[in-house]
């Protein structure tokens, strides 16, 4: 797959050189994910996510797609004192790794793992959330967005990753292996931006971030 850039690589390098991340474990997780080709939230997008968490001060956050727990940790450390994040993950390997990472981060008390498929778990949840982070299988985005709308409180925020999909959504030429997923994201973006339930915007941060505020 040919790499397509959302922002000029030199600009990201410049910003990275100015970065003041004090938690060495966060940097270790980023390097581990890079070396092992584990998809995690881009660090710039994660910085943006943390700022939104600090501004909104949600009590309950739902994360859909935990992977190794990188974004879970970044959310958890930014929560208010009694805030909590519930995170859904179906991969046993990811869950095992994330549990170790949560232990190392000393944030176990703020993170609750919901093991299983989000499509099965979300319809059964009875609690409401102030903030939802969606970063799961792209073919499931439409259904997961629908469930998220039901689980979010009024004025709640949804934060969605990968909406520019490595730059492919704006490209006239897409490699064969990316055509289906690219078309899926293109269709989802139209659905998201035309939602009557959310005030929705997409920003060129990381791999493309969608932010919706429930009306």
Image: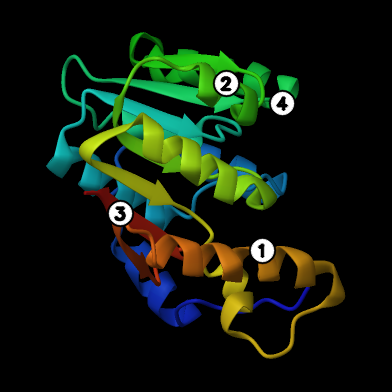
Identify the residue at image location x=43%, y=71%. Answer: 13
Residue most toward the top?
Answer: 109
CA gap, disc 2 to disc 1? 23 Å
- Mark 2 highlights which residue? 121
Q: Secondary structure at mark 3?
A: strand
**Which dot marks residue 198?**
3
CA gap, disc 3 to disc 4? 30 Å
Locate residue 81: give its quadrant. top left
CA gap, disc 4 to disc 1? 23 Å
- Mark 1 highlights which residue? 184
On the question of residue 24 being in view, the answer is no
The image position of residue 72, as x and y in percent, is: 43, 31
Q: Secondary structure at mark 2?
A: helix
Identify the residue at image location x=19%, y=14%. Answer: 82
Residue most toward the front?
Answer: 196
Q: Residues within 10 Å of mark 2 (few under 14, many from 20)?
A: some
Badge 4 or badge 2: first in the primary sequence: 4
- Mark 4 highlights which residue? 91
* Disc number lying in front (1 or 3): 3
* Disc number lying in front (4 or 2): 2
* Disc number lying in front (4 or 1): 1
Badge 3 or badge 4: first in the primary sequence: 4
């Amino acid at each position: 797959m040919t790499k397509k850039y959302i922002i000029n690589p030199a600009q990201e390098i410049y910003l990275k050189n100015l970065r003041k991340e004090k938690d060495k474990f966060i940097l270790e997780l980023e390097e581990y994910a890079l070396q092992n080709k584990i998809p995690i939230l881009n660090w710039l997008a994660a910085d943006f996510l943390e700022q939104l968490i600090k501004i909104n001060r949600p009590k309950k956050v739902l994360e859909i797609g935990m992977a190794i727990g990188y974004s879970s940790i970044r959310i958890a450390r930014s929560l208010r004192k009694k805030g909590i994040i519930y995170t859904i993950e179906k991969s046993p390997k990811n869950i095992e790794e994330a549990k170790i990472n949560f232990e190392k981060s000393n944030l176990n008390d703020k993170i609750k793992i919901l093991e299983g498929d989000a499509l099965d778990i979300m319809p059964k949840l009875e609690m409401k959330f102030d903030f939802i982070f969606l970063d799961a299988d792209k073919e499931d985005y439409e259904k997961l967005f629908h469930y998220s709308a039901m689980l979010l409180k009024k004025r709640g925020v949804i934060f969605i990753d990968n909406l520019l999909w490595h730059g492919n959504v704006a490209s006239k030429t897409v490699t064969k292996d990316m055509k289906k997923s690219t078309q899926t994201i293109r269709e989802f973006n139209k659905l998201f931006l035309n939602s009557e339930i959310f005030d929705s915007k997409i920003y060129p941060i990381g791999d493309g971030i969608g932010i919706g505020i429930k009306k």
